Image: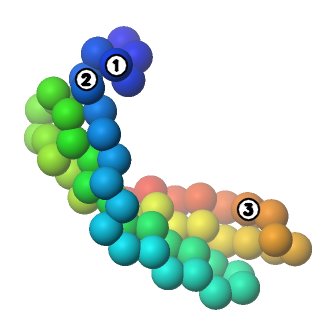
Amino acid sequence: MNRDSYNTTMKPLAFERNSEKAGLKAEVSGTFSGSPLTLTYNFEFDDKKIQSQQIN
């Protein structure tokens, strides 16, 4: 299935960033079980490049 099958949308709720880390909290909703969900995307940077990403 693709994204269009679930009519998925993501609404940013909060964003924080410093030189080494960033965090994005977003509400993901659509026509899937459990909708809407609030997900937190955490990024770590090294030399301005993403080194890791974690989604909670």
- The amino acid beneath tag 3 is Ile
Q: Residue furthest bottom?
A: 18
Q: Position of residue 15 (x, y in %)?
A: 45, 75
Comparing 53 with 27, the one in front is 27
Looking at the image, do the residues carrying marks 3 and 2 touch, with CB atoms under 8 Å apart? Answer: no
Q: What residue sits right under mark 2 in the picture? A: 6
Residue 56 vertical position relative to residue 47 in the rendered view, above or below: above
How much space separates mark 1 and mark 3, taking CA atoms?
Answer: 27 Å
Q: Residue at x 17, y 29 (%)?
A: 32
Circle 2 crowding by C-alpha within 10 Å: few under 14, some 14–19, many from 20: few
How much space separates mark 3 and mark 2, taking CA atoms?
Answer: 28 Å
Q: Earlier in the sequence, mark 3 or mark 2?
A: 2
Q: Residue at x 26, y 26 (%)?
A: 7
State which mark lies toward you, 1 or 3. 1
Q: What residue sits right under mark 3 in the picture? A: 50
Q: Residue at x 14, y 41 (%)?
A: 35
Q: What residue sits right under mark 1 in the picture? A: 4
Q: Earlier in the sequence, mark 1 or mark 3?
A: 1
Residue 45 vertical position relative to residue 27 in the rendered view, above or below: below
Circle 1 crowding by C-alpha within 10 Å: few under 14, some 14–19, many from 20: few
Tell me if 38 is positioned left or right of 50 in this view.
left
Q: Position of residue 50 (x, y in %)?
A: 73, 62
State which mark lies toward you, 3 or 2. 2
Looking at the image, do the residues carrying marks 2 and 1 touch, with CB atoms under 8 Å apart? Answer: yes
- The amino acid beneath tag 2 is Tyr
Dot 1: element? helix
